[in-house]
Image (cartoon, coloured by chain):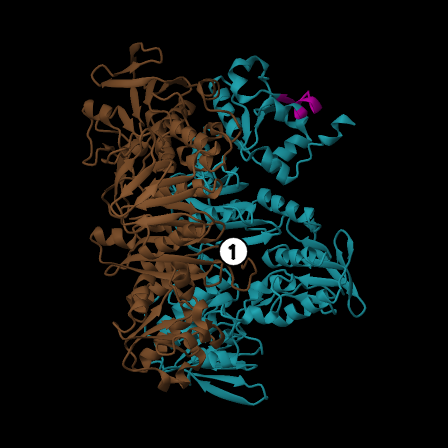
Chain colours: A cyan, B brown
């Protein structure tokens, strides 16, 4: 019997593991230690505390029924002994004890039958001057959050620089710029925001949403120094100097697993703890979970790193069950994510086109845009989906979406995310059975259209062009001998045709077969319409008539505008 | 080669099959006939046309780019010959021709290489007097819709009776009552709305939402006659007479497959056409799809009937692909659905607890209620989910949900719907990997909590009580020797305790283990809190202390209020 459980780390996985164990083994003892005084908080909520959406930090560590999860709560409600301010110094596996230093400085050994390590991560540091200046913050814990929030609410911040355009960076940028109207600049080393998670197209669409709200971005720039006397005054990149009275360092996380390494537990190359699918480390009496472990990427079958509070909670439950003598497993993750960027959101699961190719897949991706609900229903909005598949096997490797926060995008991403671990082929997306009625979906829903378009691509009947490629062609039409054929109604197309008579022509799709003689035979034909439906039809028609050099802008003019293509139409009449 | 395609029926599956075939075979000929003059309309949108959400009927038969799908559209945009007003009289399989009667009364034979039957259904009739009176309507096609809408907009309807509380009945009731403020009564033969789709609990919660908006319901009543001289004046049930100047008959649909039967095609016992997974009838040159066919229920493996425009569209694409020489399949359906009831919605997939048990499964179901997003995030609402599983195999058989139209309920239902065909066990729901960030989900999301609660039930650590059982106990506490233990904070519980001191006691969960002597030992203890979290903890605590006769109201007081339990608390102070 495992009667004594000791848990190192009391944020997400630890409390969950302890509470689950205790529910199953009311006679067991659970001791939860954490070096921090503030425990059991929702770290993912920090940006919303800084933004003011969450009015008090205690809400981030309260239950849904408004009880603060402190020592008293854990004792009275959960039957756990929580020891905040207690640092684990060393794990002694032979004696099965953990040496800890208590609040008052006393050291002692806590005996365990089973031990849980849930120590999370620490923010990754940049190896540049100035990172220890005042007003340079990480977003690692509630102390950081409280300091940032206090500065912001006191009106002490006029210009902020966020370094890193991943989840935390974007969420913090929104938090600062939205409610507090702080002049906020994001600097990112990669050439896109959310690198590794979404395609360049979708990242650019989301970036533009944030730019419209006043956030500035410098992509593909490396930060060389943070300057200031006592507090930060500016940030120097390889291309410019940005004034700043606050810096948020959000360049990822680093392992925090010294105590596990020193105890001789198996550590993966990246520094994270190795566990099996029961969440046991190389010592079967020691479990680990949350952000400090490596888990399987269920798409690639290879080790992955998914630092998400949602996964930590599920792992915690598995650990609690197993410590109580159960037999629960956690197989890994497909990497579902969603990030809010003001009124819009990026979401996805599985691999992006870039990560799929880097992972050795012969991958392609296809985008569609369509209303999230029946097009005749009044409440609806266009959402964008991208499917990543392996060409040879037609296996679905990932999906990403961009759409309004309240749109149906989130539901589509989650439906495909749910099936990814079953290794579906693309026809599973074509036939995905979304619940249907006009206020919620289309009869031929956008997610089915995504599967259909991908099948058409794989079968050779559909040759799409994405936004970045369009941009290249648009900026240099002569380089590629491009001609833009606009398949929309004349009312929509005429303004383009009038402005660019040499390269842009309006032939509404329904007139196309009667006006074939107007279609240039020796050009690369870029077919456009609003959302890619008519331009695809035109592509099919033209192919049958011998026009082989066509591309269809798959997600349509709607996506080109969101992407930020400058058609310069306003200036036409000047 | 299949060069000549004839399609009987031009609403959903037919046009989709024809257009898909034509895109793959630009050199083929497609003739689309329909006895109706109005073709290719979104029949599911009829309630929203009647309600005024859709302002003109032509919008229901227009593309997303506002072109009406008439003969000209099919000819110019799709390359199909559409013949509205043309009735198919007979299929001659030997000659491979369809005998048709054209608009002008002329009859002729249309030769086919492949034939598609997509004739839909007809509204089921009630075998009672008065169904042919004026102002008694079915909702079978656009002509019905236009007539109803004209009467309503002309202010000619004060009292409407809707017979049938399935999808169409509820949607029509909302349409009449919401915008037009018509005094609307729904009569249903079964003892709940949406019979066969959701549990009594969820149906009652949705019904109450509609009642709050003024719709009246009479359940478990059979309609015996519709009375009136020329037009309807009243509806007589086995229990009452209801004044009515409009009646909507929405009691389901009946097969419309005489032409297939007469041609000797295999017909299923229910009257629907049998097809294989390539959508071929018993004659391989004749395909059928949409509401007129029987398909496999992917949960039971038995024949099922799923009349949904969404499935019709996907079947149409499969038919089109196969007629063009491809090899597409449609495997069946899990029965995903969603229906809007004013600001709330019911949704689900797979089997309800009733249909599962009728289907021979040893099924149980478990409900949970929880915020759809992080509880500390400002925009959130409580949603209700119910999971149906087979006790022995732990296989997930179905899920249902009730929540706000804009809530995250729809996303959770679709995520579980997507995996149902893979025959998941309940741990797949516990570990379902929803995309997580606080504005979209909880770290321990409601859908994972649903899986967890179900596992706890199956493992014997959780004994829930549902709303209808609570109601029985509440109305007759002495019959069952019940005692209600309120685990919420005293502020929430005190009003109950003061009103019902004999049977209701407040012991906040965190005080429970210190106040065990106040807990009656010889009663059935009904444990309650807001959403079932603390009452479950209390159940675990009490069990360890020897209290074996407890139940926990799983979806909490929130669900009891939504269900309509009358706690009569307002009258307390009188």
Secondary structure of the residue carrying numbered label 1? loop
Q: Quadrant of the N terminus of chain A?
A: bottom left
A304 relative position to B535: left or right: right
Quadrant of residue A256 in the image? bottom right
> Is B464 situated above or below A445?
below
Quadrant of residue B480 in the image? bottom left
Q: Quadrant of the C terminus of chain A?
A: top right
Q: Which residue is mark 1?
A: B440
Pinpoint residue B444: horizontal percent, then vertical percent.
45, 63
Pinpoint residue B499: horizontal percent, then vertical percent.
41, 74
Magenta-highlighted residues: A495-505
Q: In terms of depth relative to the viewer, which is nearer, B250 or A77?
A: B250
Q: In terms of depth relative to the viewer, which is nearer, B367 or A496?
A: B367
Quadrant of residue A427 in the image? top left
Instruction: Tell whether position A284 is magenta.
Output: no
> Is A6 situated above or below A507?
below
Pinpoint residue A514: horizontal percent, then vertical percent.
52, 13
Q: Is residue A409 visible?
A: yes
Pinpoint residue B294: horizontal percent, then vertical percent.
26, 36
Q: In terms of depth relative to the viewer, which is nearer, A34 or B453?
A: B453
Disc 1 packing (10 Å; few <14; some 14–19; many ≥20): many
A7 relative position to B554: left or right: right
Q: Is residue B334 visible?
A: no
């Amino acid at each position: 019997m495992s009667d004594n459980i000791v848990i190192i780390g009391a944020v997400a996985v630890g409390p969950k593991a302890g509470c689950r164990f205790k529910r199953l083994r009311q006679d067991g003892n659970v001791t939860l230690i954490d070096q921090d005084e503030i425990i059991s908080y929702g770290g993912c909520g920090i940006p919303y505390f800084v933004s003011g959406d969450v009015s008090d930090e205690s809400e981030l560590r309260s239950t849904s029924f408004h009880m603060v999860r402190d020592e008293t709560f854990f004792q009275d409600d959960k039957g756990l002994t929580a020891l905040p301010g207690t640092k684990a110094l060393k794990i002694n596996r032979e004696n099965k004890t953990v040496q800890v230093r208590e609040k008052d400085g006393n050291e002692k050994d806590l005996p365990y039958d089973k031990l849980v390590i849930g120590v999370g991560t620490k923010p990754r540091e940049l190896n540049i001057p100035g990172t220890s200046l005042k007003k340079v913050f990480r977003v690692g814990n509630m102390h950081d959050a409280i300091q940032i929030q206090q500065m912001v609410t006191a009106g002490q911040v006029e210009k902020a620089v966020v370094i890193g355009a991943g989840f935390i960076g974007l969420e913090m940028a929104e938090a600062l710029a939205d409610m507090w109207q702080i002049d906020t600049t994001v600097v990112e080393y990669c050439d896109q925001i959310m690198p590794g998670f979404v395609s360049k197209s979708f990242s650019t669409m989301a970036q533009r949403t944030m730019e419209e709200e006043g956030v500035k971005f410098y992509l593909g720039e490396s930060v060389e120094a943070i300057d200031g006397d006592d507090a930060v005054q500016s940030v120097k990149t390889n291309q410019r100097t940005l004034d700043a009275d606050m810096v948020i360092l959000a360049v990822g996380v680093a392992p925090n697993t010294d105590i596990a390494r020193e105890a001789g537990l198996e550590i993966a190359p990246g520094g994270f703890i190795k566990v099996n699918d029961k969440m046991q480390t190389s010592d079967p009496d020691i479990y680990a979970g949350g952000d400090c472990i490596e888990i399987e990427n269920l798409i690639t079958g290879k080790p992955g790193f998914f630092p998400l509070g949602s996964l930590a909670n599920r792992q915690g439950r598995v650990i609690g069950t197993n410590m109580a003598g159960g037999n629960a497993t956690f197989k890994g993750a497909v990497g579902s994510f969603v990030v809010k960027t003001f009124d819009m959101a990026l979401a996805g699961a599985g691999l992006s086109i870039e990560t799929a190719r880097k992972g050795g897949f012969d991958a392609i991706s296809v985008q569609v845009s369509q209303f999230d609900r029946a097009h005749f229903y009044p409440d609806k909005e266009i959402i964008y989906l991208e499917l990543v598949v392996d060409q040879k096997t037609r296996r679905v490797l990932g999906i990403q979406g961009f759409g309004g926060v309240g749109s149906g995008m989130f539901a589509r991403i989650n439906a495909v995310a749910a099936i990814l671990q079953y290794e579906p082929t693309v026809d599973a997306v074509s036939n995905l059975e979304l619940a249907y009625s006009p206020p919620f979906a289309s009869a031929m829903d956008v997610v089915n259209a995504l599967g259909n378009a991908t099948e058409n691509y794989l079968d050779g009947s559909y040759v799409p062009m994405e936004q970045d490629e369009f941009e290249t062609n648009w900026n240099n039409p002569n380089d590629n001998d491009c001609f833009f054929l606009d398949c929309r109604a004349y009312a929509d197309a005429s303004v383009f045709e009038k402005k660019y008579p040499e390269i842009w022509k309006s032939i509404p799709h329904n007139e196309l077969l009667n006006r074939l003689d107007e279609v240039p035979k020796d050009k690369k034909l870029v077919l456009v319409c609003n959302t890619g439906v008519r331009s695809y039809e035109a592509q099919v028609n033209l192919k049958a008539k011998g026009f082989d050099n066509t591309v269809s802008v798959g997600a349509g003019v709607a996506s080109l505008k969101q992407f930020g293509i400058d058609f310069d139409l306003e200036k036409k009449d000047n």
